[in-house]
Image: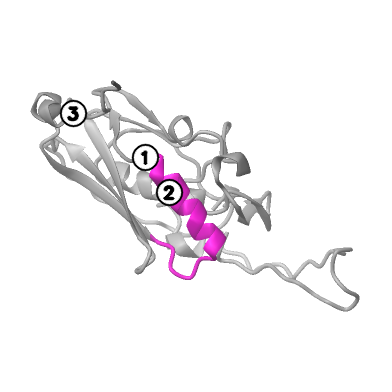
């Protein structure tokens, strides 16, 4: 018999007593493939436990983002542009976990912003892109107790929430900013020849639905 990650009889010993932080994002209006990738990614984090002083690694838990693991083609950020690739939408999951860790006051060990603003995530500064295995999101559990991670996916409202349960530390988290500087006008559209399109057909990817890496 395999012992569960969290045994209900062990909760008090582990310090899992209360909701200590939540993070949420919306994906309403996403393509069916993007929603499927979000659901597949969120599923990997059900019942994940981070021990005291342990380092949470998004990539370690989510594993290989590939077709073999159930991910589909959707829009991604590829360099400085939007393209189609396996796993588009997985950054909705990493961004939501980041927000829970942020509002819980967890020390952020590794976090990367997207190459440009993604409309679903709002203002810059509250997103976290990943690209397995090289670009990760990591935080340290400094609460002194175990942290239980539970995702909630609301397909009707198009909303993803991550709840952290444990022992709430005595601290207050405040967000300041973001501050915007060096604002520049966008460059004119760049068109490239796509031999797969019929003559005279133009196909243009338009933000904000995008990842640098994945979104």
Is 4 placed above or below 102 here? above
Specify which label sits upstream in the sequence, 3 or 2: 3
Residue closest to the eye, 52 or 9: 9
Spatial CA distance of label 3 from label 2 is 25 Å
Q: Position of residue 143 (x, y in %)?
A: 19, 30
3 or 2: mark nearer the eye: 3
In the image, residue 107 lies in the stretch drawn in magenta = no
Mark 3 surroundings within 10 Å by alpha-carbon count, few (fewer than 14), some (14 through 19), many (20 or more):
few
Residue closest to the eye, 129 or 180: 129
Q: Position of residue 134 (x, y in %)?
A: 58, 32
In the image, residue 27 lies in the stretch drawn in magenta = yes
Left or right, residue 23 beside residue 143: right
- Main SS, magenta region, reads helix
Q: Which residue is mark 1?
A: 45
Callout 2: helix, strand or loop? Answer: helix
Is 132 placed above or below 191 here? above
């Amino acid at each position: 018999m395999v012992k569960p990650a969290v045994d209900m009889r062990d909760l008090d010993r582990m310090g899992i007593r209360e909701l200590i932080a939540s993070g949420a994002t919306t994906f309403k209006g996403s393509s069916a493939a993007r929603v499927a990738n979000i659901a597949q990614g969120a599923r990997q984090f059900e019942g994940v436990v981070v021990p005291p002083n342990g380092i949470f690694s998004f990539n370690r838990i989510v594993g290989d983002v590939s077709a073999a693991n159930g991910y589909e083609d959707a829009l991604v950020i590829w360099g400085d542009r939007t393209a189609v690739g396996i796993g588009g939408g997985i950054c909705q999951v990493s961004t939501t976990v980041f927000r829970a860790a942020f509002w819980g006051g967890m020390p952020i060990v590794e976090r990367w912003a997207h190459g440009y603003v993604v409309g679903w995530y709002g203002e810059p500064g509250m997103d976290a892109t990943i690209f397995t295995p090289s670009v990760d999101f990591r935080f340290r559990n400094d609460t002194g107790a175990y942290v239980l991670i539970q995702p909630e996916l609301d397909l009707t409202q198009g909303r993803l929430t991550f709840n952290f349960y444990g022992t709430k530390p005595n601290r207050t988290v405040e967000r300041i900013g973001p501050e915007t500087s060096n604002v520049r006008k966008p460059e004119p559209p760049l068109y490239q020849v796509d031999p797969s399109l019929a003559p005279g057909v133009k196909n243009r990817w338009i933000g904000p639905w995008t990842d640098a890496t994945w979104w």
